[in-house]
Image (cartoon, rainbow, N blue to C red):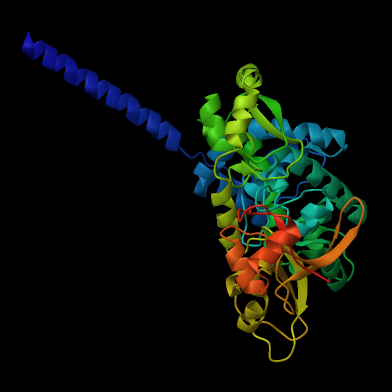
Amino acid sequence: MRIFILIFLLSSYFVSSAEFDSTKLFYDYIPDATYDEIADRIDCLDTTIPLSFNKTVRGFVDYFTVRNRDYTRGILNRKDYFFDIIEPYLKKYDLPDDLKYLSIVESGLIPTATSWASAVGLWQFIPSTGRTYGLSNSWYIDERMDPYKSTDAACRYLKDLHTTFGRWDLALAAYNCGPGNVRKAIRRSGYKTNFWEIYNYLPRETRSYIPQFIAIIYALNYAEEHNLYADFPYHLPNADTLMVSQYFHLETFATQANICMDHLLELNPSIRRGALPVGVKNFVIKVPSDMKASIDEHRSLLFDTAGSVGLKELEQFASHTPGSTYGRVKEVYRVRSGDVLGNIAGRYHVRVSDIQKWNNLSSTMIRVGQNLTIWSALNYSPSSSKLSVSTKSADQTIVGDTYLVRPGDSLWSISKNSNVSIDQIKKINKLNSNVIQSGQKLIISID
């Protein structure tokens, strides 16, 4: 009997192993496709944007279907979720449906993707272009990471670029390298009129941009012909909305409301630090819809708890993060003869690494006449340790120097740095104790 059982178990093992091996062999199988077959398939695609095929495009087709199949499987897993977000916006702005594939070339359908050039989000907006199209970004919140808002902005930008150039291939090239570089390439080519004619005059990254776009359209439309399938489709819970107008700590809220923190963060990718800042107004947070009734029932308790955790630690972290602009004022400094980054950093009481991040500098080299963005502390200017402002009350205007209290400040440290006594500061500001709060404005002297 024991021998029979042993034989049965061994046979079961070998059968299951054979099934596993055959499954793995099928999973790893890479069908062959000739140049002409791929060209014919592309010709058969029903697209609004004309798709060219050549050796450059073929190289990227091989990349997506042969050399990096795991990447393409990842895209197949994510595409349905994100295309459902993108497609209505393309329809709203009367844009070609083909443009949804551009988000893959830009970010691989990762809403929080960040490039070396500080481009962020599903559509990889740099800060200036993002602001032009209504996407704000701060230390706490970056709307470039919001799939809905960034898609709306990308549609408006793409529509503007198509209006400018009159062709989708040039509009897409301009989306990658900027309209100025495309105009320059057109001039240098002798005013040629399409992407492939100005190809050699474009930046290197842009030369591969359109070929990648064509190749990813091909790879996703003919995925089955290349034995590529979605194995773990991406999805999130159905969401409802919650309006917040206060400091709000997400992890505390998630714990108290019994919501999966990972889901909450994925539903709200624009919240960069796991919290909303003090002073936020009517910010919309997405929450799982099946939890909305419970949240509404316990709203007061949940909001009070989420509003009482972690603020001091986050503000301190914000003020010390390299390149942070939190609690700072933007200035522009024009580099003069003899300047070095170290001296400029010392003048503004910031770090060299801060200036490098604010200006996308890969080294400490600067040139005379160059404009540098400097984010100085609210309580500091190069010529004075205090910031002159006007403070208006209901019946009078008091003109004086104010100081914005930072984490770790005390009346003693402020008095020492300003040469104004503690008693005088308390008297001017009508303070009944020595207790002050981060973010509080204190009048230091009266003119």
The total of numbered circles placed on residues is 0
The foreground one among 166 and 291 is 291
The foreground one among 316 and 212 is 316
Q: Compared to 15, does 126 lie above or below?
A: below
What residue occupies the far bottom of the structure in this picture?
Answer: 338
Q: Is residue 72 left or right of residue 192?
A: left
Q: Is residue 124 left or right of residue 392?
A: left
Q: Is residue 238 visible?
A: no
The foreground one among 160 and 226 is 160
Q: Is residue 439 visible?
A: yes
Q: Quadrant of the C terminus?
A: bottom right
Q: Quadrant of the N terminus?
A: top left
Q: Quadrant of residue 318?
A: bottom right
The image shows residue 33 at horizontal and vertical percentages of 57, 42
Q: Compared to 285, does 361 lie above or below?
A: below
Q: Quadrant of residue 182?
A: bottom right
The foreground one among 279 and 250 is 279
The image shows residue 54 at horizontal and vertical percentages of 69, 54
